[in-house]
Image (spheres, rainbow, N blue to C red):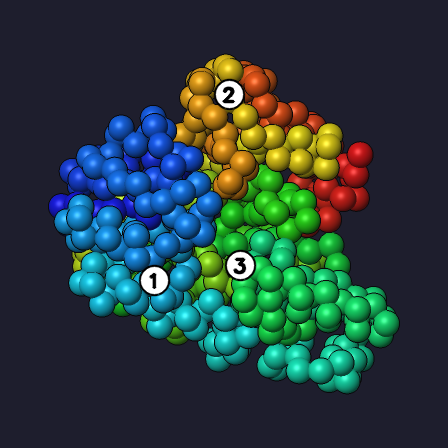
């Protein structure tokens, strides 16, 4: 096991990694921007170094400054968290060249799976179903129109290097397709520096189901069952849960086995998530692989009892997985609500500012992952998520009731948050009955 690692991230995930390391006896080095100077979680790290101004492009995304902090801190490895440099293959390669372990997959696997067009080809080769669509990138309008007529409208234009809904457009006819192509390219170029796009058949009323995997350097690949992330707004996840209520046991087994085949074929190591969409007939199709730990990883931790961050550290250090597939249970039901500093009544406008009061819920099966505290100032420079409220109970009905109780106890004064929205969602009859898909929010809660 490592003696000391650097955490190339901030906020909630940095605190999460610090806690996991503390339990393993691993020292931690944190980094921070000027905007995060004085954050309470930095006191829990053994050392902390400033890497630049508030803007992430001048701090958390500056590879040379992150590496300098790692070298000054005399670390053996870097945990990238999620976001920022977590899926940056170049950063991964720089770590390797500096003899610093990257706690994640290899740069080669990251490069392959990070390109969605390449990942789709790999999925086909691994006998993993993919959504009908273009075999490669869309080069011009004529090709796009021809392919759209072959697979049938509606179609979905997606950025090859994309994520988070950016560079994504739905087209219902030829004219809309031509407009969508230009819009998607422009947005993808601005967001990712890569305007390449491809096309898929648009699956109507889909469910978003993803499988958590962990793979070691000795050929062992294990899944930690699936999470349902269908409750989302404009491709941004709001609530995640496990197990999924929308798939039967046969489909659950098949989708988990497909995820294992996918990552095994890519010689993937460490934690990752294989994402799928599932239609009304229980057909499932590969979307992408997230080559990092995800925001919603606590959902899988709660139903399996496995600490994923500690597993990441052990695998990166060369240890074999201490469990097999048969040792991984799926016990009870877990739900996670992302608590964002946003105003849902004002178009989800960010709500930065000082948290005047913070009262954290507790009780049986309740977990709140957050770096915030009373007096903490939510910065306008970073993602608006300020915490994750997770509950775990024997059944989904009990988990919903527990979450509603926990949400009612959670008090965040001084800024607007998405807590009231979560209360409305969990109280909705369609959610309670499991009748949700990725369009649920827009269709049922447009107000």
What residue is shown at x 65% (from left), y 62% (from top)? 187
Which numbered disc flags the more N-terminal residue, 3 or 1?
1
Image: 391 above or below 226: above
Q: Give left or right: position of 40 versus 256.
A: left
Instruction: Judge depth for marks 3 and 2 and give the one in front.
Output: 2
- Spatial CA span between label 3 and label 1: 24 Å
Label whose residue precedes the other's in the sequence (1 or 2): 1
Q: Secondary structure at mark 2?
A: loop
* Residue identifier under label 3: 275
Tell me where residue 420 sits by quadrant: top right
**Most distant residue in the front direction:** 53
Q: Residues within 10 Å of mark 3 (few under 14, many from 20)?
A: many
Q: Is residue 286 above or below residue 25?
A: below
Tell me residue 204's x, y (percent).
75, 59
Q: Nearer the viewer, residue 390 or 384?
A: 384
Disc 1 crowd rating (10 Å Cα; few below 14, some 14-19, many 20+) is: many
The CA span between labels 1 and 2 is 34 Å
**One can see residue 391 in this view:** no
- Are the two marked residues, 3 and 1, in contact with CB atoms closer than 8 angstroms? no
Q: Position of residue 27 (x, y in %)?
A: 18, 40
Q: Which residue is mark 2?
A: 355
Residue 119 location (% of width, % of height): 50, 72
Quadrant of res 432: top right
């Amino acid at each position: 096991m490592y003696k000391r690692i650097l955490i190339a991230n901030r906020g909630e995930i940095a605190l999460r990694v610090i806690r996991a390391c503390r339990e393993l006896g691993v020292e931690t080095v944190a980094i921070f921007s000027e905007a995060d100077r004085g954050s309470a979680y930095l006191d829990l790290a053994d050392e902390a170094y400033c890497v630049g101004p508030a803007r992430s492009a001048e701090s958390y995304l500056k590879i040379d400054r992150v590496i300098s902090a790692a070298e000054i801190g005399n670390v053996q490895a870097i945990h990238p968290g999620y976001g920022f440099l977590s899926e940056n293959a170049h950063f991964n390669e720089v770590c390797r060249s500096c003899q610093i372990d990257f706690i994640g997959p290899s740069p080669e696997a990251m490069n392959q799976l990070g390109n969605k067009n390449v990942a789709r080809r790999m999925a086909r080769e691994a006998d993993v179903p993919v959504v009908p669509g273009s075999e490669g990138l869309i080069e011009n309008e004529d090709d796009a129109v021809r392919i759209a007529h072959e697979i049938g409208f509606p179609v979905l234009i997606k950025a090859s290097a994309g994520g988070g809904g950016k560079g994504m457009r739905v087209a219902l006819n030829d004219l809309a397709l031509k407009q969508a192509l230009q819009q998607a390219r422009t947005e993808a170029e601005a967001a990712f520096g890569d305007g390449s796009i491809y096309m898929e058949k648009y699956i109507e009323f889909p469910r978003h189901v993803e499988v958590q995997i962990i793979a070691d350097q000795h050929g062992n690949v294990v899944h930690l069952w699936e999470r349902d992330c269908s409750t989302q707004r404009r491709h941004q996840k709001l609530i995640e849960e496990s197990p999924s209520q929308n798939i039967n046991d046969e489909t659950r087994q098949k989708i988990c086995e497909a995820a294992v085949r996918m990552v095994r074929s890519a010689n993937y190591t460490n934690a990752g998530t294989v994402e799928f969409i599932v239609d009304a007939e229980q057909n499932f199709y590969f979307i992408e692989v997230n080559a990092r730990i995800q925001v919603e990883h606590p959902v899988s931790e709660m139903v399996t009892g496995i600490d994923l961050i500690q597993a990441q550290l052990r695998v990166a250090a060369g240890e074999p997985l201490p469990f097999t597939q048969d040792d991984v249970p799926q016990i009870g039901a877990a739900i996670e609500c992302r608590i964002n500093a946003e105003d849902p009544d004002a178009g989800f406008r960010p709500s930065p500012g000082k948290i005047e009061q913070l009262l954290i819920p507790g009780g049986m099966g309740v977990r709140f992952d957050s770096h915030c505290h009373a007096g903490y100032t939510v910065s306008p420079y970073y993602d608006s998520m300020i915490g994750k409220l997770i509950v775990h109970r024997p059944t989904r009905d009990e988990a919903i009731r527990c979450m509603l109780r926990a949400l009612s106890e959670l008090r965040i004064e001084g800024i607007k948050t998405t807590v009231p929205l979560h209360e409305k969602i969990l109280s909705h009859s369609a959610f309670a009955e499991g009748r949700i898909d990725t369009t649920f929010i827009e269709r049922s809660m447009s107000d």
